[in-house]
Amino acid sequence: MTTGLIATLAAYLFGSLSSAIILCRLAGLPDPRTDGSGNPGATNMLRLYGKGLAFATLTGDLLKGLLPLLAGRWLGVDTGVLALMGLAAFLGHLYPVFFSFRGGKGVATYIGVLFGLDWRAGAAFVLVWLAMALAFRYSSLSALVATLIAPAALWWLGAPLPVVMSCSLMAVMLVWRHRSNIRNLLAGKEHRIGSREGA
């Protein structure tokens, strides 16, 4: 029990390490929350500071979801604790204790969690995202559709109930964090992938 609590807290703290903000500070650049969409994520970093920092942000945010779960498996924690660790890392990204609880929208960290719980679900997310992005060229729409499909994929793959419930809760929170994107999509104002503005 103690190991599970410590592991879950550690996952939250690790998730609270905002890749975008840390990279900007190391590079002497302004906080990404003060420009563009205000989101400290890979899409905003791409628009503000280019492909290199965007890729580094994406990688860092994905690893925040994946590495705690790999550590949990190494420690031998049970499936319920793994599910809580994934949720904790995700919450750390959304509400980072080190950065005034102002975090990102959670897509990359969610992907990392999925790969940590079941690589097939992570692969399903990536494939759905790519298909939607190629078809419609909206990053937010691609993420939303893939996010909603992921818990169903886990259920179909026979994942334990705590895993399905944890990922379903993350999906709900992720959709909530994208509410401004949803409004823009419905109004026809959302910017497409490759445009110089928004998302």
Image (tube, helix red, strand yellow):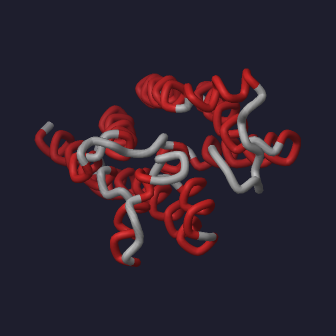
Image quarter of residue 4: top left
Position of residue 145 measured from the top left corner of the image (x, y, whole percent): 70, 31
Q: 82 or 194, which is in the foreground?
A: 194
Q: Which residue is drawn at 38% across and 60% down?
A: 31
**The C terminus, quarter of image:** top right
Residue located at (75% from left, 50% from top): 193
Q: Is residue 164 visible?
A: no
Q: Quadrant of residue 32?
A: bottom left
Q: Is 134 on the left or on the right of 147, as rendered?
A: right
Where residue 153 appears, as percent x and y from the top left, is: 65, 31
Query: Which is nearer the eye, 68 or 43?
Result: 43
Residue at position x 71%, y 36% from top?
190
Asked whether, in this view, residue 1 is left or right of residue 38, the answer is left
From the viewer's perspective, is 6 left or right of 45? left
Q: Residue furthest bottom?
A: 27
Query: Can you give x and y, in whole percent of width and height, for residue 28 in the image?
Result: 37, 76
